[in-house]
Amino acid sequence: MKRLHVHVSVADLNQSVRFYSTLFAADPAVTKLDYAKWMLDDPALNFAISTRSGKAGLDHLGIQVETPGELQDVYGRLKEADQPVLEEGQTTCCYAQSEKAWITDPQGLSWETFLTSVTSTVYGGSPEPAAIRTALEACCSPDAPQDACCAPDAGMSAATACCGQGAPA
């Protein structure tokens, strides 16, 4: 089963947890000092909030999958889209270890696709959506040198591939 993912940056986590718990008629599945997540079945939604961004509002959207096969299917569709793809690979983000890739829509809204393997005790160091957009724009432009795609100075690991190149591990 695929699940829509929505991540919203909030100014006051406690106030937002109360609001969304009431809206969803459910307590969060994960609660940390700077983060909360609801895993809803109706609708199938992974809804997360955090205070980690400097600006309140929609942070990014995504598609969470449950199997490696579903992940490969979604990765294939990303590569067919008319936008560069950043394959982040294995990473720790949002108190979970996942394999993920990022793409931006034509308006610049970041989307992630991911398969979570286990929980983590740390939030993680996955790049913020604004950094991902900047890296995709810089390394995936037609003027970028062939080997510039997601180089370490773009804030990504040397093993990360984008622009539809490379394959997930």
Image (cartoon, rainbow, N blue to C red):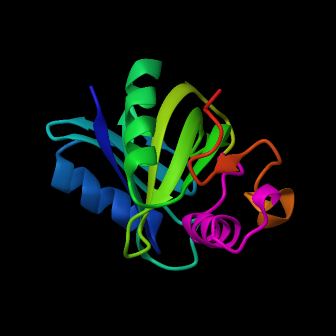
Q: Nearer the viewer, residue 56 or 137?
A: 137
Left or right: 118 as drawn, with respect to 27: right
Which residue is pictured at 47% across the width and 20% down the height? 68
Region rendered in magenta: 123-147
- Relative height, residue 64 to residue 138 (above, below): above
Left or right: 32 as drawn, with respect to 74: right
Name which quarter of the figure residue 95 lies in.
top right
Name which quarter of the figure residue 122 lies in.
top right
Point out residue 64 in the picture as x, y percentages from the top left corner: 39, 37
Point out residue 94 in the picture as x, y percentages from the top left corner: 56, 46
Q: Nearer the viewer, residue 34 or 39?
A: 39
Which residue is pictured at 63% across the width and 71% down the height? 141
Point out residue 157 in the picture as x, y percentages from the top left corner: 80, 49
Which part of the image, by quadrant, shows the N terminus? top left
- Residue projecting furthest to the bottom: 55
**Is residue 129 visible to the viewer in this orientation of the structure?**
yes
- Relative height, residue 13 to residue 66 (above, below): below
**Is residue 29 visible to the viewer in this orientation of the structure?**
no
Q: Nearer the viewer, residue 146 or 160?
A: 146
Name which quarter of the figure residue 56 lies in.
bottom left
| Total count of labels | 0
Left or right: 51 as drawn, with respect to 162: left
Which residue is pictured at 39% across the width and 47% down the height? 80
Left or right: 97 as drawn, with respect to 81: right
Which part of the image, by quadrant, shows the C terminus? top right
Which residue is pictured at 27% across the width and 42% down the height? 45
Residue 140 is covered by the magenta coloring: yes
Point out residue 49 in the picture as x, y percentages from the top left corner: 43, 58
Q: Nearer the viewer, residue 123 or 139?
A: 139
